[in-house]
Amino acid sequence: MSERADSDHHDGVPGETLGQIQTDRACIGCGFNLFGQTIVRDEHYGMPIARCPECGRVCALQEYPGLGAWARRWSSGLAAVWLLVAIGLLSLVLTLSIAPTGPVLEAQVTGIAEVIAERHMLDEQANPKPGARLRGTRSVWSGIDEQWAEQNDIGAIVRERGPVWTQLDDGYTIVLALLWLMIYAAILAWPVVLTRAGRLRVGAYGAGAVLLGGVITAMLFRNQAATASLARSYALGVAWPTLVGISYPVLATAAFASAFSGRVLARCVIRAALPPRYRLVFAELWRADGKEFG
């Protein structure tokens, strides 16, 4: 039975049980959620009442007038806003997964580019072309002769010094950690907005967006490497499978970390910022994880 107990039937048996409150209703004394509390008939006035188990206050059960057509309009408007927020969060994560993540990861191939430029310079010095001006320095921005690149396996030249992932710049781990925190913060609002979705599903949504960004970034890296003319571009052509293959699965774990901590952090903030009587509107953040509201 819902809280719509018939308050006009004063001829009922005093103290009889009329049902339970089946909606969220805050105690006007302490703010406790009265959902599930027993409705009984008051022995003195014969009216249906519910007593707060926290503070013992008798709480009124009167109904409020309906909003009519405005209720539907407001609910439709709020649903549209919620949908736009959800799409906006998805677009934000996808954008962050491509830029600035892509350019920041690309910057970690400086050491590999120097290896390519150095070998190119040494080969030029060993076999100089007639009339060619030899460079005495090497740079990640050094131009690479196209004929030399066709005659040499640049990937093999790089791997002579070890696996590609060991030759990424020294700051790669720090960069990856900072990118992880960026993705984590961007997805942190998802479990709060998608309260009807389980935490694993929210994490899967976020990880899917990150991995989709990884696919797009891989395509951009590959296209950029296909037009190589500089040592840096050739380095990216060798390193992009390793960069994408390591970085984006690691970044995808940030989505699951956010999914399992987002509502927890939201509940902590609500408890710290709001008194009990104002928390009821956020009760879904507790019920979504099977927690008792309070």
Image (cartoon, rainbow, N blue to C red):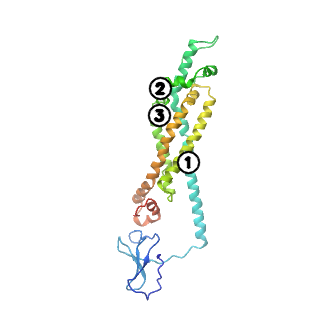
As drawn, the label of residue 172 is 3
- Name the residue furthest top: 130
Q: For the residue labelled by badge 2, is the local secondary structure a helix, a strand or a loop?
A: loop
Residue 26 location, x and y as percent? 43, 70
User: In the picture shown, does residue 27 fall above or below 84?
Assistant: below
- Neighbourhood count class around disc 2 (C-alpha, 10 Å): few under 14, some 14–19, many 20 upward: few
Q: Quadrant of residue 236?
A: top right
Against 50, residue 133 (above or below) is above
Relative image position of residue 44 (x, y in whole percent): 38, 86
Q: Which of marks 1 and 2 is in front?
A: 2
Q: Bin the neighbour count of mark 3 within 10 Å (Cα to Cα): few under 14, some 14-19, many 20 and up.
A: some
Query: How far from the left and from the top, in percent, is residue 185?
Result: 48, 48
Badge 1 is on which residue? 92
- Residues at discs 3 and 1 in contact (Cβ within 8 Å): no
Return the x and y of residue 24 as percentages of the image width and height. Answer: 46, 69
- Residue 104 appears in the rendering: no
CA gap, disc 2 and disc 3: 16 Å
Q: How many marks?
A: 3
Amino acid under disc 2: Gly
| Residue on which disc 2 sits | 162
Q: Return the mark for residue 182.
A: none
What residue is at 55 percent from the left and 29 percent from the top? 238
